[in-house]
Image: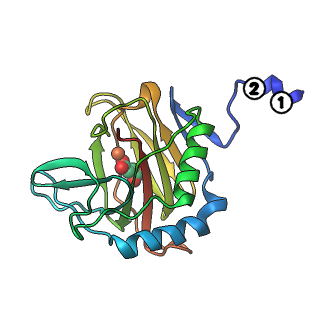
Amino acid sequence: MIDDLFADSPPDWCEVLAPGAMVLRGFALPRVPDLLQAIDAVTADAPFRHLITPGGQRMSVAMSNAGALGWVSDRRGYRYDAIDPDSGRRWPAMPRAFAQLALDAAGEAGFDGFTPEACLINRYAIGARLSLHQDKDELDYDHPIVSVSLGLPAVFLFGGFERSDKQARVPIAHGDVVVWGGPSRLRYHGVLPIKPGSHPLLGEQRINLTFRKVR
Ligand code: SIN
Ligand code: FE2
């Protein structure tokens, strides 16, 4: 088969950022209607809120969660919690469309059997940003992070293992999925302030889903 000649090179919609890290261009596009419906259902139950960092700053990104665990931040620190602190109830269950997309995107990137317990839902209004950080509140780093972007475009900063390492500036569009795991699992990353604009489906916002296997 002619395909076998290319078995080792990724398809052209897959952009490798570093070993174990790649952008799957447009991977989520066919699933957008289901994803938006699921996001609406989750955030009706667990509304977006601006968390406070341990340092006392209000985050510019508004957040919610789906799944058995949710990522939260307050004056006491960052952690995963089964309970939404705003409602005192469990986070909404992981929608089927979320779980399937996470599994499929991770598999496409070479990480089989990805079954995250947590989906952090980030909502960026124009001007909102996420400063450089590592995702390291999880108990093991054997599983990748899967990050799905919807709505307004963004510039994703993808750095090294020290905060001061030079970062690639990766343009991310509606429907793109970024996966980083294996040797890239602990790379610093962040999002530059969202530029003014309006997306035909989502208006003046960007929504990002990040899936994590926590325990
Ligand atoms: C994150 O690092 O949790 C989110 C990244 C993004 O919004 O693209
Ligand atoms: Fe992150």
**Residue tagged by mark 2?**
7
Quarter of the figure with residue 89 = bottom left
Residue visible at 21% across and 61% down in the picture: 51
Element type where label 1 sits in the image:
helix
Element type where label 2 sits in the image:
loop
Relative image position of residue 114 (x, y in whole percent): 52, 40
- Of 186 and 38, nearer the camera is 38
Mark 2 vs ligand 1: CB below 8 Å: no
Relative image position of residue 108 (x, y in whole percent): 63, 39
Query: Farthest residue in the right direction?
Result: 1
Q: Label 2 vs label 1: CA separation?
A: 6 Å
Instruction: Give the residue type at disc 2.
Output: Ala
**Circle on res. 94:** none
Relative image position of residue 65 (x, y in whole percent): 36, 60
- Of 98 and 191, nearer the camera is 98
Residue 14 at least partly seen: yes
Question: The N terminus is located in which quarter?
Answer: top right
**Residue tagged by mark 1?**
3
Residue visible at 31% across and 62% down in the picture: 90
Measured along the vertical axis of the image, is residue 110 above or below residue 88?
above
Q: Relative to 141, is 77 on the left or the right?
A: left
Instruction: Give the residue type at disc 1.
Output: Asp
Relative image position of residue 121 (x, y in whole percent): 39, 60
Question: The C terminus is located in which quarter?
Answer: top left
Residues at circles 2 and 1 in contact by the CB criterion of under 8 Å = yes
Residue visible at 36% across and 68% down in the picture: 126
Q: Relative to 31, is 122 on the left or the right?
A: left
Ligand 2 resides in the quarter of the picture at top left
Q: Coloring scheme of the render?
A: rainbow
Q: Relative to 39, is 189 on the left or the right?
A: left
Q: Relative to 16, is 186 on the left or the right?
A: left
